[in-house]
Amino acid sequence: MSEKIFALLLYLYPSQFRRRFGEEALQLWRDRLRDEKGILHQFRLWIDLIWDLTSSLPRAYQSRSETLARAGTSANALPGLHSLETGSISPGVFLLATIAALFALGAVLALSTIGGKLRLRHIAVTKDPPYAHQIPAQNPAQAAPERIPSDQTDATAFPSESTMSGGLQAPERKWVIETAITNLQKYYLAPDIADQMATALRTHEQNGDDDVPNRRVFARLLTQQMQEVSHDQHLRLEYSAIPTPANSGGPTPQEIAQMREEMKREHCGFSKLEMLPDSVGLIRLDAFPDHQVCASMAQSAMKSMNGARALIFDLRANGGGDPAMVSFVATYLFQQPTHLNDIYNPRADTRQEFWTGNAVPGNTLADKPVFVLTSRSTFSGGEEFCYDLKMLRRATLIGETTAGGAHLGSWHRLNAHYGMGIPIAKPVNPISHTDWEGTGVHPDIEVKAADALSVAEKLARESNHP
Amino acid sequence: MPKQKLSPLPAAAFQILLALAGEDLHGYGIMRQVEEQTSGRTRLGPGTLYTSIQGLLSEGLIEEVAPSGKAEPSDERRRYYRITVSGRKIARDEADRLADVLRIARAKKIFRGDYV
């Protein structure tokens, strides 16, 4: 029966399409009927079909007229005249279209009646973090890098869209290098190293080391040259084929929504939450994303670990992120607000303190043993979590020495296609009075990253804690 | 200008190219593969699937091929599709474009003073 309905519905599509794909579509429908048994699946099948009809029908007709139009122009017909199918619509098709239209109308009416009664699932958005020592919200004007007069340079000196359409030429290379140097000397946290980098960049350019036609490769070369001098892994220059928007006043609401969606899909970096045997909780966290977007996700993740007698954080693939998120997650590991880290900006001579928040009501993890798994790839904010907990003797680090990137920076747009990340500040740990830049964080127990979990599991199970 | 019609590449067409990047598949196979690679988020209906296939065929991004040896006899109604060299290139370009979008998103995020 349903096969017949489907076959009839196929008549709604252009005859050409039906002749070519009708049999295949019918076979696909049979396959789905065969594989998707049960009322729910069947219901879903029909919903899929109706949705599919409404979205693909217009396209099927549009693509036909496009093909015809193109056929016309290729035969030197007058441009702009779309030839349409000459045959009239058959009564069968007309009848089917009427039925489909009535059906769609009914569906809309039904939805609008019951729609009001349906409770929309509330999408988790940012809640206030559960700690009193709120990190002061950064003033966007302050946080955003000072605007370099890139727009003026766009217009006067260099790269306009049209000049950038071909291969990479010497004037563009020179412009990018000089603009990068200006920014380094203005913002990079160590002025003497900025000068050394400037010399290195210019020497490489004069030696012809940068003579590559590909802009992406060029950007990578400059990054390497800067890192050879500074060994600063946060310092880099990137090329984007898609023009980046000029406004640097922070992301637009649309971009924030998109980012939220992205983060939700990625579970805010919490790629694994598991209760291992003997109530050992395992949290695999691959990033510390913006805490304004991910606080509620982190809350529920940490809450799900309540009842664990020991906790393992797997940060072996953690690439870092927001220092406020580091404090937010660490809050669950302390009974009271604890000073974790300071961030010092040498040029402005300003210091920002990072503390854990007040004890979270209902949290049972504050006094449980904590193990953190590390690897050579654990980077940046991931390393901060390791370093802070190590200094406070709150966790046992197991694995490899981490990557060694401690600096914090901001993004500087050079023009629509080039931008660079320039470190402007560095952590100063309140206990060690230094950071892990270049050295990495050394584990307490050094084992290969691949073996870290089994070692930690064993220790966690043996840990004798009330 | 054959590229014009599928530029920008619609999401469904991109998913189909990705599905075919691994092996030659028939329509139902493509649908299942897309469902799998998007963790169940995208089920291409027959209309969307075949209008996309039609577009991809006419742009030369995929081609029809003879069923592979493992095809069952009941498969005679099914037609198998394979990604072409230009299909691969378009898919790669689209992936690059998405990587750029991601880069911009990342760039935006660090305006708030994150670790870069």
Image (cartoon, helix red, strand yellow):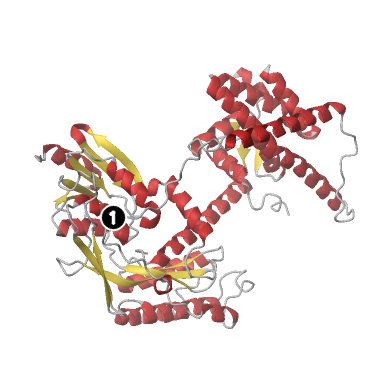
| Above or below, comparing residue A320 to residue B71 in the picture | below
Say what secondary structure mark 1 lies in.
helix
State whether residue B27 appears in this view.
no
Q: Nearer the viewer, residue A255 or B12?
A: A255
| Quadrant of the image containing the C terminus of chain B | bottom left
Which subunit holds the residue at mark 1? A
The N terminus of chain B, quarter of image: bottom right
- Report the residue that reaches farthest toward the top: A1
Please tell me how crowded label 1 is: few (under 14), some (14-19), or many (20+) other residues with Cα within 10 Å.
many
Residue B34, position in %: x, y?
Answer: 54, 36
Task: Please report the residue visible at 57 percent of the width from the left and 82 percent of the height from the top.
Answer: A157
Q: Is residue A218 left or right of residue B94?
A: left
Q: Is residue A122 toward the left or the right of residue A358 in the image?
A: right
Q: Residue at x 63, y 47 (%)?
A: B10
- Mark 1 sits on what residue? A328
Residue A165 picture location, percent across and down = 62, 69
Q: Position of residue A51 (x, y in %)?
A: 64, 35
User: What residue type is disc 1 on?
Assistant: Phe
- Label count reads 1
